[in-house]
Image: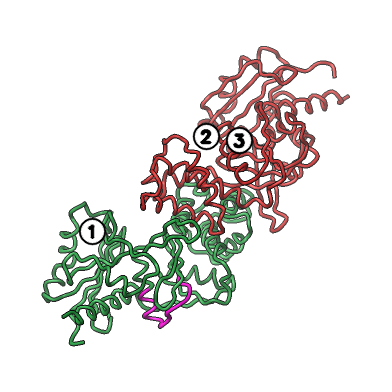
Chain colours: A green, B red
Amino acid sequence: MTRLRPFIALDWGTSSLRGARLDDHARVVEERSFPRGILTVPQGGFRTAFDECFGDWMSAAPDTLCLISGMAGSRQGWAEAPYCASPAGFAEASARMHWIEPGRIGLVPGISHMSPRDGTPDVMRGEETQIFGAIHLLGRTGGVFVLPGTHSKWAIVEDGRILSFRTFMTGEFFALLSTHSILARTLHANAPFDETAFLDGVMHSQNSAGLLHNAFSARTLALFGRMESDALTSYLSGLVIGEELRSQPLLSGIPVVLIGSAQLTARYAMAMTRLGCHVVAPESNATWAGLHALRMQVEAQTETRP
Amino acid sequence: MTRLRPFIALDWGTSSLRGARLDDHARVVEERSFPRGILTVPQGGFRTAFDECFGDWMSAAPDTLCLISGMAGSRQGWAEAPYCASPAGFAEASARMHWIEPGRIGLVPGISHMSPRDGTPDVMRGEETQIFGAIHLLGRTGGVFVLPGTHSKWAIVEDGRILSFRTFMTGEFFALLSTHSILARTLHANAPFDETAFLDGVMHSQNSAGLLHNAFSARTLALFGRMESDALTSYLSGLVIGEELRSQPLLSGIPVVLIGSAQLTARYAMAMTRLGCHVVAPESNATWAGLHALRMQVEAQTETRP
């Protein structure tokens, strides 16, 4: 490989837009963040938003490469980068890059997976890049990769490729319950995190009755004065995360790769450890690492072209 | 027994107030309904609301007996009728009646149940009266009694007494998901009921991944054009009700008594039948029947007093 072009990595999600200039070794040179998620950008306004936020970086060197992961590649985003069908890895994702400007500004495609049982589709967009990053950062090419969030993803990775995955609407259920349900009346959404109450929720959720039943305990424990309202939010968080963990078959023994924000992965690690599961997590930003890995793939492909 | 006093049965819930004059054989003589659930009544305003809605019935005969079931007996209601601990039946409920006017206007107590596994409390208020009514109407003194709703109740009844029960927040989860979640963007809340989509949801929900995962299929099936948005609401209803049914151990073979509104019990019956469960349902209003049964108990107790 002769030399690498200057590189900008963008994580353009539903509610935020983050970007970084990375050097040839994936180190962050400069980073920016804007509250300009795709939901704030009008149709046809993506080029303008991009130029406003990163135009100076792009024009600093005319051969700069920019790769963008996240919902910017969805139907509601800048342009639709069609999903790659699983199994998919670096090769498929870089080959199916959707180019806004050929070889210059590319949208990373999401990945779809059809359930082998009944063909029900599942999708991820952005998380594939984080998984690629974690593979790169940890040097692990296989295992269970978990990305907690509004819509958590559980992926099975083998030989650096995503074989299958499932989405769990855990973060969204928590938000719905703590904001709009009857439980919202008694809990304090802004109470500090209570580890004991959280783990109580995790353990309580492991019974077979399921979240539809167990969530009600957040009401009755308050009603009977058995839990302080300050503890209820953490307890509910434990119930919902515990429910997600309950439906994963046989995790004990298998180390799980946990990717995401420090606060959320800390909760998942706490819950998983309590349930006897071994957890590893990359220490650097998995999205930047993933976009850097895809950049290397793109540059290698460019180089081999006649 | 000499003669029965005139009787008024009231079902005073969170969002509505219904009343009926019943004859000596529990037949409805006259019925009224008001949008004056307890949430619309200011503290201290219950007597006035009661008089406005039913004062003429009460004053028509000075010895009229009125029994009230539902949330009017809660801490936020007319007065708190403390919960009876399970197991509890007619005897306990009538003995623990909370009298607004002694022997004349009584609030039926709710029932509480502590999980034998970890002591987590569960509560019902109003449903105990419906169960008593169904026992009376069907002549069944035992079995599994199911009351679908915002907070569905599953009760184990033996010898006419409620031994244990569990709450499932099924109706509330459905409302949250169809109103406030990401799924709300694609589904048509007012689309007509689609039986095929509903049963698809029921069957899809029987896998071990659980509702946190399965609910996401309502999004992806729309995204991939695999389900019409008109069908999604029924599908989601099937997913949520199916999740409630999935967590009930071994229902096949045991006939289940289903109590509630015609529309909702029809859905549950459809889902349960599909899952191989035998369903029976009372054909008359279970609340009126339950309040009548409690009335007979109260009158018998009064009669035996010296």
Q: Distance between the residues labelled 1 and 2?
A: 48 Å
The residue that appears at 73% across and 55% down in the rendered structure is B116
Instruction: Say left or right for A19 vs B47.
Output: left
Compared with residue A63, is residue B287 higher up or lower down, i.e. above or below?
Answer: above
- Seen from this angle, which residue lies furthest front? A306
Q: Mark 1 points at which residue?
A: A79
Compared with residue A100, is residue B147 higher up or lower down, i.e. above or below?
Answer: above
Circle 2 chain: B
Circle 1 chain: A
Between B31 and B183, which is closer to the camera in this rendering? B183
Compared with residue B134, is residue B9 higher up or lower down, i.e. above or below?
Answer: above
Badge 1 local density, few (<14 within 10 Å), some, or many (20+)? Answer: some
Which label belongs to residue B71?
A: 3
Pointer 1 and pointer 3: residues touching (CB < 8 Å)? no
Between A252 and B46, which is closer to the camera in this rendering? A252
Q: Is mark 3 on a helix, strand or loop?
A: helix
Q: Earlier in the sequence, mark 3 or mark 2?
A: 2
Which label belongs to residue A248?
A: none
Q: Quadrant of the N terminus of chain A?
A: bottom left
Q: How far apart are marks 3 and 2 (CA)?
A: 10 Å
Q: Name the residue under label 2.
A: B39
